[in-house]
Image (cartoon, rainbow, N blue to C red):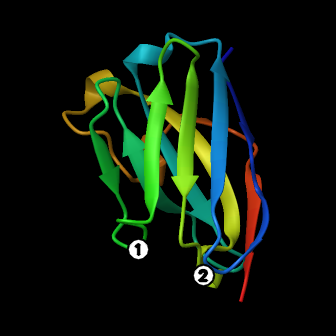
Amino acid sequence: QVQLVESGGGSVQSGGSLRLSCAASGMTYSIYCMGWFRQAPGKEREGVAAIDSDGNTIYADSVKGRFTISRDNAKNTLYLQMTSLKPEDTAMYYCAATYSGFYSTCPLIMNDYNYWGQGTQVTVSA
């Protein structure tokens, strides 16, 4: 049974940094695309960043240059380093996984991901 558990959320001031982690289990981690998504109150869930097992990445335009996605295949762990945080980054952040064999590039579309964590809250104050 696939399980994804996020951690590292919290409250920071604008301009601050946070590092999110996602521990995966019950899967052959290296063959999965891993992604970070977020959902703010009253808004749809949106893709933030995704990474394949070779380290190829894709980012939403809103976070390019500020967020860095990475993964440790030996530890089955996904990371999201967030810097220069803005109030508009406030959201619940979710880790997600999908089998990478279906894609030449890991997607940033919510419906393409099969497995989800419970989320970790990030709050950025002005």
Residue farthest bottom in this picture: 126
**Disc 2 target residue:** 88
Q: Is residue 20 left or right of residue 35?
A: right
What residue is at 19 percent from the left and 33 percent from the top? 104
**Disc 1 target residue:** 62
**Residue nearest the viewer, comparing 25 with 42:** 25
Q: In this view, does 122 lie to the left or right of 85?
A: right
Q: Is residue 47 above or below residue 36?
A: below
Residue farthest left in this picture: 104
Residue type, label 2: Glu
Q: Are marks 2 and 1 in contact (CB under 8 Å)?
A: yes
Q: Distance between the residues labelled 2 and 1?
A: 10 Å
**Residue nearest the viewer, comparing 49 with 71:** 71
Count of numbered circles on the image: 2
Q: Is residue 121 above or below residue 98?
A: below
Residue type, label 1: Ser
What secondary structure is marked by label 2?
A: helix
**Residue nearest the viewer, comparing 86 with 36:** 86
- At label 1, counting other C-alpha atoms closer than 10 Å, the crowd grade (few under 14, some 14-19, many 20 or more) is few
What residue is at 65 percent from the left and 35 percent from the top? 22
What secondary structure is marked by label 1?
A: loop
Q: In this view, does 70 lie to the left or right of 100?
A: right
Comes first in the chain, label 2 or label 1 = 1
What residue is at 36 percent from the left and 65 percent from the top? 65
Q: Quadrant of the C terminus?
A: bottom right
Residue 11 x/y as whole percent? 80, 68
Q: Is residue 110 above or below residue 35?
A: below
Residue 81 x/y as whole percent? 54, 51
Task: Give residue 42's quadrant in the image.
Answer: bottom right
